[in-house]
Image (cartoon, rainbow, N blue to C red):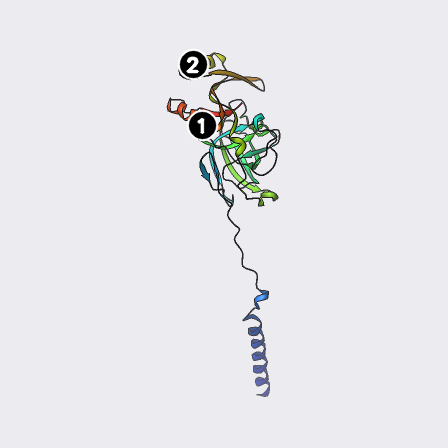
Amino acid sequence: MKRFCCLIILVGILIAGIYGCTRSVPSSSRPPSAIPPHPPKPYKALGQWYQPLPDARGFKQSGIASWYGDDFHGKKTSSGEIYDMYAESAAHKTLPLGTIVRVRNIDNNKEMEIRINDRGPFVTGRVIDLSYACASKLGVLGPGTAPVELIAVGTTASAANSGAGSADFYYQGNFTIQVGAFSDRSNAEKLKAKLDKSYQNAHIQSYKSGMEIFYRVRVTKCSSLEQAIQYEKTLALGGYEGAFVVAE
């Protein structure tokens, strides 16, 4: 009987000890509450506001890719870096700066991973602006644009910079509107003759991509992107839905 009582007392002490250890945790030992990061600031470009995404996880998008080169080479990007057209980078309107996206050219199935370090393109219908180097690898240089699929696959260590940056350098320069691109010059000449009847400065610019030459048909000449976008809309209403702004 005495042993049984001692055993009961011992079990009681153990239970009390366990309960005393687990029932409360000093506030200084508790893990700190997670503090949500501040959302990235919205920014305005060409009269329109854009809200960058706080996170790129699960991001997927399809649309038209374009590229930018000489006119912006050596100028500051929205991330603060200097744009190098021969480096692999791209611009996107809302993905966090530093996001790595896998870009696939739907026309030729070429794909590569690219870091977003700039804002843009601020032109209707386009989802990403590729550097010259990326456009070359993806086969976008000749035609100037291509349908693509974007998938966010990661981020760089420097992606903590969530500021809106500035897209001011997009506003000024020499801009024109590309209406078509052909490998057969006679087709380009026909389109140029047709455009000559209604639009100013219709011209053909040849571009060699590998062994192939493309003849790009373009119209007008603008000193600002805003003016060029208005011409682009006019051309779209006139039946040239595929027309897009380019910097010369």
Q: Position of residue 93 (x, y in %)?
A: 50, 37
Label 2's element?
helix
Report the residue marked by disc 2: 196
Q: For numbered disc 1, what is the local secondary structure?
A: helix
Q: Residue at x 57, y 26 (%)?
A: 71
As rendered, which of 80 and 183 lies closer to the eye?
80
Q: Is 2 placed above or below 47 here?
A: below
Task: Determine the residue positioned at 37% across, 24% down.
Answer: 237
The residue identified by callout 1 is 229
Tell me if residue 48 comes above or below residue 224 in the rendering. Answer: below
Mark 2 neighbour density, 10 Å: few (under 14) some (14–19) many (20 or more):
some
Mark 1 or 2, nearer chain start: 2
Hey, what amino acid is under mark 1? Ile
Does the residue at mark 1 contact the one at mark 2 (Cβ under 8 Å)? no
Kind of residue sitting beneath label 2 = Asp
Judge the density around disc 1: few (<14), some (14-19), many (≥20) Cα neighbours within 10 Å: many
The x, y position of residue 239, in whole percent, is: 38, 22
Residue farthest to the bottom, as pictured: 2
- Quadrant, the N terminus: bottom right
Q: How far apart are the alpha carbons under marks 1 and 2?
A: 19 Å
Q: Nearer the viewer, residue 89 or 43?
A: 43
In the depicted structure, whether residue 183 falls above or below residue 74? above
Q: Give 71 or 117, whichever is nearer the viewer.
A: 71
